[in-house]
Amino acid sequence: MKIHSLYRLFPLIMIFLTLSSPALAKENLLCSTQILAKPIPNGYTWTLASRLGKILRMAEKEYGERDKRWTLLGVEFSTDDRPSIWYPGGYEAKNIIIQLTRSTSHSEREALFQLTHEVFHVLSPNAEIKSTMLEEGLATYFSIKALQSMGFTINKKYIANKKYQKAYRLVSQLYENHPETSELIKSLRKQGLKISELTADDIQAIFSNIDSGLASQLAHKFGS
């Protein structure tokens, strides 16, 4: 066969190798049940796309409607070592994509743990504001609660990162002293306030009789 003919066939050969090799397919995430919907009676199996809708409704019920000036484009896997939200087209474009780590493509629980956390941040996008312990703690608290409601066995021991462990612990204290925390956060957001903009004084004014030390720690910038 002539060399120029091989060049024409090269794209087809690569597609065949990708689809026929389990290793390459896994690397390219083609086999992940997180994105591959399979027909079942009355619909399809759960994927990250369909889970996203349910989780977003749960978050809005708990903490108020998301800022609809932003367009949520969906969920994707990333080669980064941590999940995040990114803004394709720049912050002014008002587009959001939730990125999960590649390792979660074959771990439903971990994928949903990351997804629920990032969904909380989608409620009030704040790329221009560094998040606080309060916001990260609420996001982690919501993750645990949401996965438990979906039937997953999970508790605070599942949180691996020490910074998130501390944020979760602080918010758990807040809920213990103020069971109405979700409603108070919802009310604040209706006023257009962003959680990470709250100072220690703001938190003390919102949560009656809160310990000043706890208020200060909750207002502290995450990771500082």
Image (tube, rainbow, N blue to C red):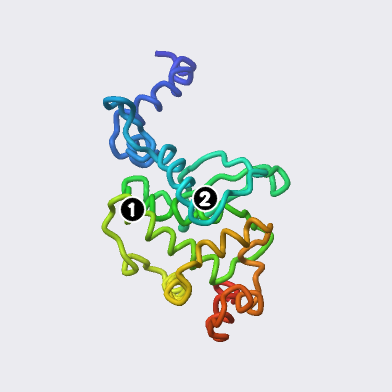
In the picture, which quadrant includes the C terminus?
bottom right
Extreme right residue here? 92
Q: Position of residue 56 (x, y in %)?
A: 49, 46
Q: Amino acid at mark 2?
A: Glu
Residue 3, placed above or below residue 95: above
Residue 31, placed above or below residue 11: below
Q: Is residue 6 left or right of residue 221?
A: left
Most foreground residue, 5 or 210: 210
Residue 175, placed above or below residue 109: below
Residue in the image at 56% along x and 45% along y: 97
Q: Residues within 10 Å of mark 1 (few under 14, many from 20)?
A: few
How far separated are the C-alphas under marks 2 and 1?
15 Å
Q: Secondary structure at mark 1?
A: helix
Q: Is residue 128 left or right of residue 54?
A: right
Q: Secondary structure at mark 2?
A: helix
The answer to which quarter of the image holds residue 126 is bottom right
Residue 159, placed above or below residue 111: below
Q: Amino acid at mark 1?
A: Ser
Residue in the image at 44% along x and 59% along y: 142
- The reply to whether callout 2 and callout 1 are in contact (CB within 8 Å) is no
Most foreground residue, 106 or 130: 130
Residue in the image at 38% along x and 59% along y: 145
The circle drawn on residue 163 is none
Q: Residues within 10 Å of mark 2 (few under 14, many from 20)?
A: some
The circle drawn on residue 149 is 1
Q: Position of residue 201 (x, y in %)?
A: 66, 79
Residue bearing mark 2:
60
